[in-house]
Amino acid sequence: MIAVLRRRPHLLWLLVPYVLFVGALPFVNRVQPVILGLPFLFAWLMGATLVTPLLVWLARRGDQRGDRR
């Protein structure tokens, strides 16, 4: 696993959604503050959901760049 990450470090982008959804959950599990009328936890999960495709795209882009070499 470590050898794969040394050759393809762009795959670490795929860990960020995991941290946003699972790792940060104990810290963001609260109602206050309210963001755009939504409880903080719901706003956090919606933001993480919107950021995830960007992070997957970054990992894929790095993979394609490595294939060309």
Image: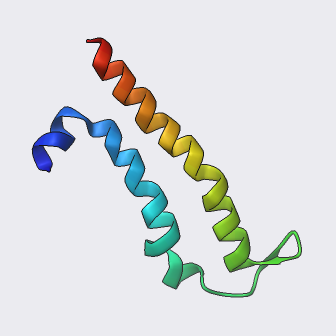
Q: Is residue 13 above or below residue 68?
A: below
Residue at the extreme top: 69
What residue appears at the point 64 percent right and 69 percent down from the top-left corner? 45
Q: Is residue 9 left or right of residue 45?
A: left
Q: Is residue 66 above or below residue 52?
A: above
What residue appears at the point 42 percent right and 37 percent down from the top-left corner? 59
What residue appears at the point 60 percent right and 85 percent down from the top-left corner? 29
* Coordinates of residue 67 in the picture (x, y in percent): 29, 19
* Coordinates of residue 25 in the picture (x, y in percent): 52, 79
Q: Is residue 28 left or right of residue 67?
A: right
* Coordinates of residue 32 in the picture (x, y in percent): 75, 85
Q: Is residue 24 above or below residue 14?
A: below
Q: Is residue 45 above or below residue 51?
A: below
Quadrant that contains the C terminus? top left
Q: Is residue 40 left or right of residue 8?
A: right
What residue appears at the point 33 percent right and 47 percent down from the top-left corner? 12
> Which quadrant of the view contains residue 46?
bottom right
* Coordinates of residue 55 in the picture (x, y in percent): 51, 44
Q: How is the image coloured?
A: rainbow
Q: Is residue 64 left or right of residue 43?
A: left
- Count of marks overlaid on the render: 0
Residue at the extreme right: 37
Residue at the extreme left: 3
| Residue closer to the observer: 67 or 44 | 67
